[in-house]
Amino acid sequence: MKAVALTRYLPIDDPGALVDVELDRPVPGTRDLLVRVEAVSVNPVDTKVRAPKPQVEPQPKVLGYDAAGVVEAVGPDVALFRPGDAVYYAGDITRPGSNAQWQLVDERIVARKPASLDFAEAAALPLTTITAWELLFERMPYAIDGGGDGKALLVIGGAGGVGSIAIQLAKLAGFTVIATASREATIAWCRELGADHVIDHRHALAPQLQALGFAQVDAALNLADTDRYWDELGELLAPQGHVGLIVEPAGALKIGDPYKAKCIGIHWEMMFARPRFRTTDMDEQGRILARVAGLVDASRLRGTLRETLSPINAANLREAHRRLESGRSIGKLALAGW
C-alpha cells in the first residue's frame, strides 16, 4: 500500500521530513477495523511528533491521527461495524497513523461518519472535536445540555482547530462565548461559528473584557499558550472558576494564588489518553463521535474544514505541516484521495 512516513526527524522544508513509501497492508487484530483511508486531516500533534530530533527510526514511521474512510475488513471480536461502513476517528498515538491507504483502528474509538459530510469534511473533525468535548464536558464540570447557562467562557485561540469546535459546543451548552483572534479573517471565522464577542489576544485581555461588561469569566479554555496567559487567567477567572488546558507549559507553572485562593479548577485534556492507556471507558470516544455525527447531521454543529489538498502524498503533507507550523491556519486543513 501507499503511505507517507519518516525515518528521520527533520525540518519541514527538508524533502526527507516526510517521504512516500510502499508498505505491507496490515491485518486486523481482535477488535480492529481495517479501514480504507479516503481522507485525513492534520493537527499540531502531527508537527510536534515530527519535530526535529536526533532519533532515527529503524522502520518507516507513519504519522496521522484524523481519518475518514470505509471499513474493508474486521477482526474476529468486532461487534460494532462491518465491511462497507463509512467511518471517522482520531486514532491512537501508539499505533501506525492514518497517512496510509489502509489503517488498523480499534472499533471502540470509531463512529460512523456524519452522512451529511464528505470524507474530507468528516476527517477534519475527530481529534479536535473529542478534545473540545472531553475538556468541556468530562474534564470540566459542565454538561452540553444547559451546563453553560448564565456563564461566560473565554476561548483563547478561537480560530484554531480545537477552538473552532469548542466555540460551537460551548454555544450548544448555553455559554456566552468570548473568543480571541487578531486578524480580520480569524475574527470573522469566530463570529461565523457563533462567538458572541471576539477580543484581540495581542493585547491585554482584562481591559477588553471590561469594555464588554465582563469583570471576570466563569471559565476559560487556553488552547494556544499555557505559559503566556497563566497569570492573566488567574486574575480573570471568577472564584471557583475553571480553566482547561491542552498545551504543555514550557516551564513550571505557579499553582499558588490566585489559583489556590480562588479554588480555580485546573483541567488537562489529552485526547489520546483513553486509547494510549486502554482505559476501561475508551469506548466513550466512539460514543462522543457518534453523538457529534448526529449533531452535524441535524445541522446543530457545522464542519470546520477550510481547505482540502489532493492527493494524499508526501509533498502535500509537507505543505500541510508547513502551514500549521506558520501559526496562521484557520479551522482545519484536510487531504483526500490517493
Image (cartoon, rainbow, N blue to C red):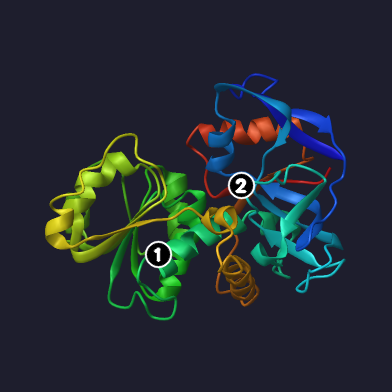
- Residue 269, compared with residue 173, is above or below; it is above
Question: Which residue is at a point 42% across and 52% down the rendered structure image?
Answer: 158
Q: Is residue 202 visible?
A: no
The residue wearing badge 1 is 139
Q: Residues within 10 Å of mark 1 (few under 14, many from 20)?
A: some
Question: Which residue is at a point 64% across and 48% down the rendered structure image?
Answer: 65
169 horizontally vs 322: left or right? left
Q: Is residue 101 visible?
A: yes
Question: In which quadrant is the N terminus drawn?
Answer: top right
Question: In which quadrant is the C terminus drawn?
Answer: top right
212 horizontally vs 110: left or right? left
Three-letter code for the amino acid on which mark 2 is drawn: Ile
Q: Which mark is residue 93?
A: 2
Residue 233's x, y, as percent?
Answer: 23, 51
Three-letter code for the amino acid on which mark 1 is drawn: Arg
Residue 281's x, y, as percent?
Answer: 55, 69
133, 75: nearer the viewer = 75
Q: Residues within 10 Å of mark 2 (few under 14, many from 20)?
A: some
292 horizontally vs 157: left or right? right
Q: Which mark is residue 24?
A: none
